[in-house]
Amino acid sequence: MAQLATDELESLETRIAGLAEKVAAAMGMEVVLIEIKGGGGRSLVRAYIDQPGGISLDDCERFSKRLSVLLDVEDWIPFSYTLEVSSPGLDRPLTRERDFERFRGKQAKIKTRAPIEGQRNFRGRILGVLDGRVGLDVDGGREVRIPLAEIERANLVVDI
């Protein structure tokens, strides 16, 4: 991948996400996450999509074809890449306020950018979002409020 500064990479991800969200909306889907990974000729642009009832391989293929055409037309990506489209899976990433509201009551793992109450890794039941902070019930009754802006990564926890 051409060496892009972190802010350039985030800007590119944001532009790709906007385009992907238009494609998804037209197909009755939602974009869960867009990420750019790799380098050295092995760059990957990954899109996680979802819809009520789940995502099939055919859904991923149709979405990939439509998004690929638009990315080629826009020509924003200054390096060669492979486009990968998939379902978010059981350990779905939580990236927006609406994700935390949608999965209220479910178990999640959250990693923060900076320590909160002396730690960066949390696991607990999602209580919802209030004033830009995710409520998480950890240790069966202790509530931690985590600012959305401080979340580095969050995923649902698979209950097996």
Image (spheres, grey):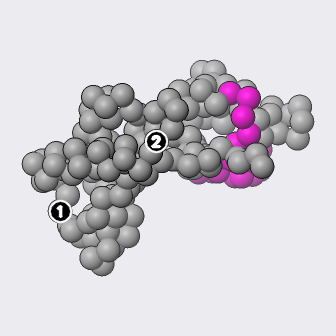
**Residue with the mark numbered 1:** 78
Q: In the figure, is residue 14 to the left or right of 75?
A: right
Q: In the figure, is residue 100 to the left or right of 78?
A: right
| Quarter of the rendering containing residue 138 | top right
Q: In the figure, is residue 94 to the left or right of 141?
A: left
Residue 34 in the image: state x and y as whole percent.
39, 48
Dominant SS type (magenta): strand
> Pointer 2: residues within 10 angstroms few (<14), some, or many (20+)?
some
Residue at 10%, 48% (x, y): give it.
73
Residue 130 in the image: state x and y as whole percent.
63, 21
Residue at 27%, 76% (x, y): give it.
41
Q: Tell me which amino acid carries mark 2.
A: Ile
**Residue with the mark numbered 2:** 55
Residue at 39%, 32% (x, y): give it.
29
Residue 129 in the image: state x and y as whole percent.
63, 25
> Pointer 1: residues within 10 angstroms few (<14), some, or many (20+)?
few
Magenta span of residues: 104-122
* Residue reaching furthest to the bottom: 40
> Is residue 141 in sight in this rendering?
yes
Q: Quadrant of the N terminus?
A: bottom left
Measure the C-alpha gap from mark 1 to mark 2: 30 Å
Q: Tell me which amino acid carries mark 1.
A: Pro
| Local SS, label 1 | loop
* Residue reaching furthest to the top: 130
> Is residue 47 in sight in this rendering?
no
